Amino acid sequence: MNQINLNSARLRDQILGCWMGKNCGGTLGTPLEKAWGEAEVFDVWWYPVLADGGIPNDDLEMQLVWLRALEEVGPQLKAADLARTWQNHIAYNMDEFGLSKTGLSLGLRPPISSYYNNWFRDCMGCPIRSEIWACVAPGAPRVAVRLAFEDGIVDHAGGESIYGEFFNTAVESAAFCVSDVDKLLDIGLSYIPETCLTARAIRVARDCHAQGLTWQEARQKVLETAPHYNAQFSPPNIAFQVVGWLWGLEFGDAICKAVNCGYDTDCTGATLGSVLGIIGGAESLPEKWTEPLGHTIATSAPSGGLTHVEEIPQTLDELTERVLVQARRVLSFHGLLNGDDTVKTSETELWADDTVRALWHKNPTSVEFSHLSDAVHVALDYIDTPAMAPNGQKTVQVALSNPQPKALQVAVSAIAPAGWSAKLAQNSVEIPAGGAAKIDLHLESPARAQLENAQTIFVAAAARNRPVQSAAPFVMVGARAVRLCGPFPLDGKEVSEVMEAETELEHPSGDAMSPQARKGEWREVVALDNALPVEGELASGGVLYAQLWLHSDEEVKDGWIATGTTCAAKIWVNGETIATSLAARPLRPNYDGPYDGTAAPYGDAHLRAGWNEVLIKYVRAEDAELPFEAHFIVCHGARHTGLTTARWTRFPWDKASKPSE
């Protein structure tokens, strides 16, 4: 039987050690992080940068915000609470952070808000936030992982990264009462499916250690098992933490070896530092590594990365004390805290159970509205995507559940905006006590001229002889209206020559807002998300033009227009060139650009009130190796926040879509 005393100096030292270790590993790895994975290992054995006041790191500072959410909401914290907190306090938009926040801005709720249109949902954004959940549920990994699930689906629903956060959280929570490395790894693996890529990568690292291979050889085997060019892809990074742990001779050597595996270096170093800090406590951490950093927490609040965060902890000691307060709340809420302020858990209770394994199968396209419910609970399953093309048809599913001890007769209705049709397969159903029912809801979208970026449909469930309850609102996203022209052959010319050469198509004539303004044979297509429908285009190289229109009700002086693509591209906004890139690189369609200082088709754009034309020229070499892919990105502000208020669903010549509307 394992026992943890919430009043003990040992627990306080372990929690402090967690944050100190994370600070050490994050400071070591942050200056080395890159967007692209590199073939060779690094050779870094000390902090590459030591800045006055410390180096801000999202791995730590986001958890300060999560602590505030837990303090405000309590142990019953849900993904919707964290999403609201995120929008209020976290301003940066790197990779999955920006894409999932755009889903929220459209009105979507977790988990669909981060499942939809999120190329980065298999990346490291949520595994790095595991410590807060482990520390408020020390020795109770089942509780900690359930909280981690609510966290993970805010920006990684349906992604491999959820498993990375589960693994990290379980290991760290169990580390409060277990110190054996192999046992902790076994416990962590019990919390993720054995067939998932994360588990496979971890097992490869362990096998390499058992076989006596070097850490460099283990790193290569991990990359062969879980290959990806994106440095933030989570499965190999989780395994790199294990490499550092198994091959590390002591704390500094361990975090350096994890970081020297490369890829998402701040994340791997920080998480391993946390694990080692929990196991040994703050007193075990070498002064060589901790003394240069002190206990003050550096955040990005001064530069605007965090906003309205006056009440977050300022030091690691304050963080530790406030985490202890929340640990008492969480453990009490789950009935795990005894009268003597101890948590007692058996060995078997450290391992995953059926309630945890059920989380593996939670549907990332299903949104629950139980917070609006009284008599009957309502959920809406989008089945796949919340996006619809004009004049489209789609069936979603309404799920009703009855938590009452007696049967309920429930009337169900749907209300759709003008131009939309929403018809339920049935309008009344009897649900037995503790039972559930599913009803198909058939949707039909209007013509393009009536389609908005986001439109809300309401489903009302009224139980007979019960108080009325609020209708459940769910958002359908309007597809992006796109025109394509081409492909045109290169005729043996170089990409740079073709990009520089102007064509008649690039110079509109007559009414710029008419479909005939640009010469050529244009075809209308739709994009259900940022990815343009270009599969099969430019298979043998060539030139393709894409035209999109944005209608803004107000002037946007700080617009940011981009295309994440695998070939050369040039972008014009209202006839002005804003970005040109001749580079062909693997797809990484984030909001900020490539992070490596190289030219990319991303640029500042001034959007006027009314209609704005975006024209993109793609040029792919005849001998190109990368498949042609292209995403359209529209943001605003210095932080590159997704811009959802500029209508992307229509063309200027569509009836009833004049600028005044």
Image (spheres, helix red, strand yellow):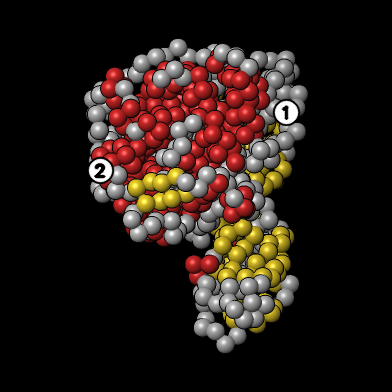
Most foreground residue, 383 or 243: 243
Q: Tag 1: residue type?
A: Leu
- As measured in the structure, the alpha-carbon distance from the residue carrying label 1 to the one carrying label 2 is 57 Å
* Left or right of 538, for residue 144: left
Q: Classify mark 2: helix, strand or loop.
A: helix
Circle 2 residues within 10 Å: few <14, some 14–19, many ≥20: some
Q: Residue at x 48, y 54 (%)?
A: 79
Q: Residue at x 48, y 14 (%)?
A: 42
- Residue 53 occupies which quadrant of the picture? top left
Q: Which residue is mark 1?
A: 538
Q: Tag 2: residue type?
A: Glu
Relative height, residue 191 to residue 650 (above, below):
above
Circle 1 residues within 10 Å: few <14, some 14–19, many ≥20: many
Dot in front, 1 or 2: 2
Q: Tell me if residue 69 can be seen.
A: no
Q: Tell me if residue 433 can be seen.
A: yes
Q: Residue at x 75, y 33 (%)?
A: 536
Q: What residue occupies the far bottom of the structure in this picture?
A: 465
Q: Position of residue 374 (x, y in %)?
A: 51, 75
Q: Position of residue 40 (x, y in %)?
A: 54, 13
**Tag 2 or tag 1, which sits nearer the N-term?**
2
Most foreground residue, 637 or 575: 637
Relative height, residue 243 to residue 526 (above, below):
above
Relative height, residue 493 to residue 372 (above, below):
above
Q: Residue at x 57, y 70 (%)?
A: 377
Q: Which mark is residue 318?
A: 2
Asked if the residue at tag 2 contacts the one at tag 1, i.e. Cβ–Cβ closer than 8 Å, the answer is no
- Residue 616 occupies which quadrant of the picture? top right
Most foreground residue, 227 or 498: 227
